[in-house]
Amino acid sequence: MSGTDAVIGVQTVSSWRPRLEASVLPPAYQDLLEVLGDAGGPLRAKQIAVGIGLGSGEFSKIEGSGRSRSGW
């Protein structure tokens, strides 16, 4: 990669540590935490997608079931 190449579409997320607030996360991640917190129980990926405002035509954009290594 040369010095003029740019990385597009990447957001870094800090690793969780005690007393770290969700407000340090990007807004999209905060939205996900809100949907999960309001649910009161397990959700399927499509339920989360609806909760964050993705229409049924956008379900193909949902990634696989990879797990975050950052601890959130």
Image (spheres, rainbow, N blue to C red):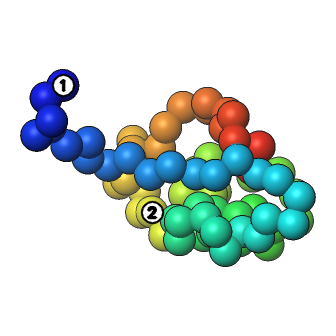
Taking the image as shown, residue 4 lies to the left or right of residue 57, namely left
Q: Nearer the viewer, residue 65 or 11?
A: 11
Whether the residues at callouts 2 and 1 have beta carbons within 8 Å, the answer is no
Residue at left 50%, top 49%?
12
For numbered disc 2, what is the local secondary structure?
loop
Q: For mark 1, what is the residue?
A: 1
For numbered disc 1, what is the local secondary structure?
loop
Residue type, mark 2 in image: Leu
The quarter of the displayed image where residue 4 is located: top left
Residue type, mark 1 in image: Met
Residue at left 87%, top 66%?
19
Image position of 25 with respect to 58: above or below: below
Q: Nearer the viewer, mark 2 or mark 1?
A: 1
The quarter of the displayed image where residue 22 is located: bottom right
Residue 43: x %, y % from top left: 75, 52
Residue at left 64%, top 57%?
47
Labelled disc at residue 18: none
Bin the neighbour count of mark 1 within 10 Å (Cα to Cα): few under 14, some 14-19, many 20 and up: few
Residue 11: x %, y % from top left: 44, 51
Labelled disc at residue 54: 2
Residue at left 76%, top 51%?
16
Residue 21: x %, y % from top left: 77, 70
Total number of numbered labels? 2
Q: Nearer the viewer, residue 45 or 34?
A: 34
Taking the image as shown, residue 70 lies to the left or right of residue 3, namely right
Taking the image as shown, residue 2 lies to the left or right of residue 34, namely left
The quarter of the image holding the N terminus is top left
Q: Using the numbered discs, state the Cα–Cα distance from disc 2 to disc 1 in whole angstroms.
A: 34 Å
The reply to whether residue 37 is in sight is yes
Q: Earlier in the sequence, mark 2 or mark 1?
A: 1
